[in-house]
Image (tube, rainbow, N blue to C red):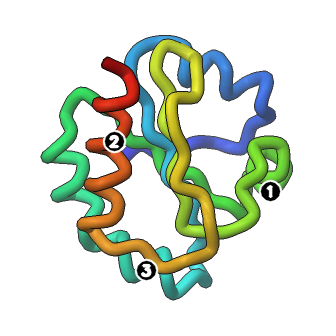
Amino acid sequence: MEQLPKMSAADLKDVVKDGKIMLFFSATWCPDCAFIKPAMPDIEAEYPDFKFIAVDRDENIDLAAELNVFGIPSFIAYENGTEIGRLVNKDRKTKAEVEEFINSLATNAD
């Protein structure tokens, strides 16, 4: 998974402008993030139409605040620059919950 460098919300617009992008907000100290991380390669493989990008919440604290990401792990999906969904809260997330979220995006987009 690609790692997002430190950037502002304005810079992020360039990153998410083309295609389907899934931002995965986490931090090294976060036990719930460590819980979902082992499942991420499988989730990425199941959804090849999305480009998954890891965002270190601590490194990008201003970006997280601008995007109203106050709990981690969290996911924000974009399609061609437009946010199409978010799974943002402080709860632990299972592989099934993340898959359900991504599957709901396809339903919403159709």
Residue pictured at 44% horizontal, 31% vertical = 21
Tell me where residue 8 appears, x and y as whole percent: 80, 34
Rendered image quadrant of residue 76: top right
Q: Mark 1 or 3 closer to N-term?
A: 3
Name the residue that disc number 3 marks.
34
Local packing at callout 1 (Cα closer than 10 Å; few below 14, some 14-19, many 20+) is some
Classify mark 1: helix, strand or loop.
Answer: helix
Name the quadrant of the C terminus: top left
Q: CA distance from mark 1 to mark 3?
A: 19 Å
Name the residue that disc number 2 marks.
104
Specify the label residue 29 is tagged with: none
Q: CA distance from mark 1 to mark 2?
A: 28 Å
Is residue 110 depicted above or below 60 in this figure? above
Of labels 2 and 3, the one closer to you = 2
Of labels 1 and 2, the one closer to you = 2
Name the residue that disc number 1 marks.
61
The type of residue carrying mark 2 is: Ser
The answer to whether marks 1 and 3 mark residues whose Cβ atoms lie closer than 8 Å is: no
**On the picture, is 101 further left or further right than 14?**
left
Residue pictured at 54% horizontal, 23% vertical = 16
Q: Mark 2 or 3 closer to N-term?
A: 3
Tell me where residue 56 appears, x and y as whole percent: 62, 59
Judging depth in this view, the residue of 71 and 3 nearest the camera is: 71
The type of residue carrying mark 1 is: Ile
**On the picture, is 11 further left or further right than 53?**
right
Local packing at callout 2 (Cα closer than 10 Å; few below 14, some 14-19, many 20+) is few
Tell me where residue 6 appears, x and y as whole percent: 72, 44
